[in-house]
Amino acid sequence: MKSKIQKVKLIVSDLDGTLLQNGAQALEERAMIAIRKLQKRGILFAAASGRQYPNLERMFQDLGKEMIFICENGALVIYQGETLIESFIERELGIALIQDIYQRKDCEVLLSGKNTSYLHPKTEAYLYRIRDVVKNNITIVEDLTKVEEPFLKISVCQRNGIEPSMAYFQQRWGTQVHATISGKEWMDFTKLGVNKGTSLELLQKKLKIQKSETMVFGDNENDIEMLKQAEYSFVMENAKEEMKNYGNYTTKSVEEILEYLEKEL
């Protein structure tokens, strides 16, 4: 790795379970310092997450306008205030999916617009988590199927873990939308063919940056496609063992690799 790492022009990192460890909802100062130093060296940094754009913008506000945001698992990409990529689930399909999720026991729906998440929470615990822990911009509605804004992403959150419902949703919807696991309790749905990897590929083309000049960090199923888009692909050491097949390297923390890169430049 050492001989070519100086070629890196773009760094892309997942957040939850990767740059944010142990359920953290804010960046460590060590990470902020490392990213800022690399930005000063002309390296672009992208946050790639299932999270919404306002959430990411707040989290990285101290790092300036050079941040790239790959939001909603690739359905929305924003750079320097400009929307570069925007992909929507077809409305009738989305409504049917929302209805299916909502009728399933212990399952909550999160509907993603560009600047807000729409909820019709079944429980106060779910509302508290999205509003007060994750700190999303939220809009509570009586009927999610009546939301007029286009559907960027639809998510299901299942209390005590999504595993019991994975096969059900994959079998029922996997040929019509892109379905991926994004956390222990979460499964996300985007337009078919849209994920972090496809959006990263489009971003690389727009910026004229090669895979050999790209570094990616991830830990979960929704990172697989983007890990394939980089020569320097890192899977977190605490990820599931099967995930480590998708990275060329492993690491305990993103920060240690960013600090190593800065020293090598």
Image (cartoon, rainbow, N blue to C red):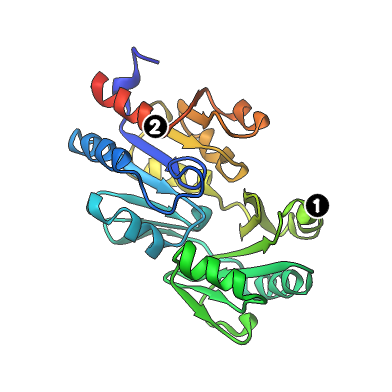
Residue with the most extreme top position: 3
Q: Which residue is mark 1?
A: 167
Along the viewing direction, whichever of 216 and 17 lies nearer the viewer: 17
Residue depicted at x 61% and y 87%: 142
Q: Which residue is mark 2?
A: 214
Residue with the most extreme left position: 40
- The amino acid on which the numbered mark 1 sits, given as a three-letter code, is Ala
Quarter location, residue 186:
bottom right
Q: Provide the secondary structure element on which disc 2 rests.
A: strand
Residue 178 at x, y = what percent? 65, 54
Question: How many dots with numbers?
Answer: 2
Relative horizontal placement of residue 98, taking residue 57 as reference (left or right) = right
Quarter location, residue 220:
top right
Along the viewing direction, whichever of 207 and 171 lies nearer the viewer: 171
* The C terminus - image quarter: top left
Q: Note whether residue 219 is visible.
A: yes
Residue depicted at x 30% and y 38%: 30
Q: Note whether residue 191 is visible.
A: no
